Image (cartoon, grey):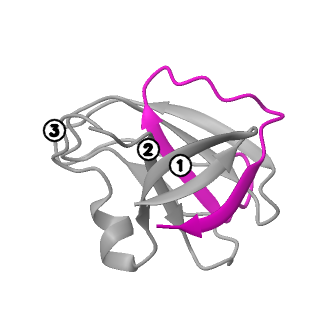
Amino acid sequence: MVEVRLGGDSITVALADEPALRSRGLMGVTDFGSLDGMLFSWGGDTVSSRFTMRNTLIPLRVVFFDSDGAFVSQADMVPCEVDECPSYGAAGPYAFAIEFPAGTAVSTTDRLELGLTG
């Protein structure tokens, strides 16, 4: 778990910063417990990877941020239990993404600040 700031608020997130963790994401998770979400990081690199909801049990909102922490875009994602699941991408290149419970409000003016403490 790490604590980051989003729009001036501190949030606690799981960190997916290695390929295996990013690939697994929130598969099989039924609730967030004490976490606000899951932060996906590519070590500061800018990427255009897409997200899929295969074997993910709860609806999610994914929010994408650039390397400076500025909002790029967001997408609402639904669970998928079949082999061919839709994929969800950002409106442009991004460096970080956070998966939240569906319906979590994030403003286009919110900035992501990484202190990466945990």
Residue drawn at point x = 61 percent, y = 54 percent: 4
C-alpha separation, residue under disc 1 versus residue under disc 2: 6 Å
C-alpha separation, residue under disc 3 versus residue under disc 2: 21 Å
Mark 3 surroundings: few (<14), some (14-19) or many (≥20) residues within 10 A: few
In this rendering, the label closer to the viewer, 1 or 2: 2
Stretch of the chain drawn in magenta: 91-118
The amino acid beneath tag 2 is Gly
Tell me whether the residue at label 1 lies in contact with that at label 2, contact meaning CB atoms closer than 8 angstroms: yes
Q: Answer with mark 1 or mark 3, whichever residue precedes in sequence.
A: 3
In this rendering, the label closer to the viewer, 3 or 2: 2
Query: Any magenta on residue 80?
Result: no
Disc 2 marks which residue? Answer: 37
The image's mark for residue 28 is none
**Quadrant in the picture for the N terminus:** bottom left
Question: Residue 57: x and y, percent?
Answer: 20, 35
Query: Any magenta on residue 103?
Result: yes
Residue 102, compared with residue 97, is above or below; it is: above
Kindly state the secondary structure of the residue where label 2 is placed.
Answer: strand
Residue 93 lies left or right of residue 57; in this view the side is right
Residue 86, compared with residue 78, is above or below; it is: below
Disc 1 marks which residue? Answer: 98
Residue 28, compared with residue 69, is above or below; it is: above
Name the residue nearer the viewer: 54 or 33: 33
Disc 3 marks which residue? Answer: 81
Question: Residue 115: x and y, percent?
Answer: 66, 66
Residue 107 lies left or right of residue 77; in this view the side is right
The amino acid beneath tag 1 is Ile
Kindly state the secondary structure of the residue where label 1 is placed.
Answer: strand
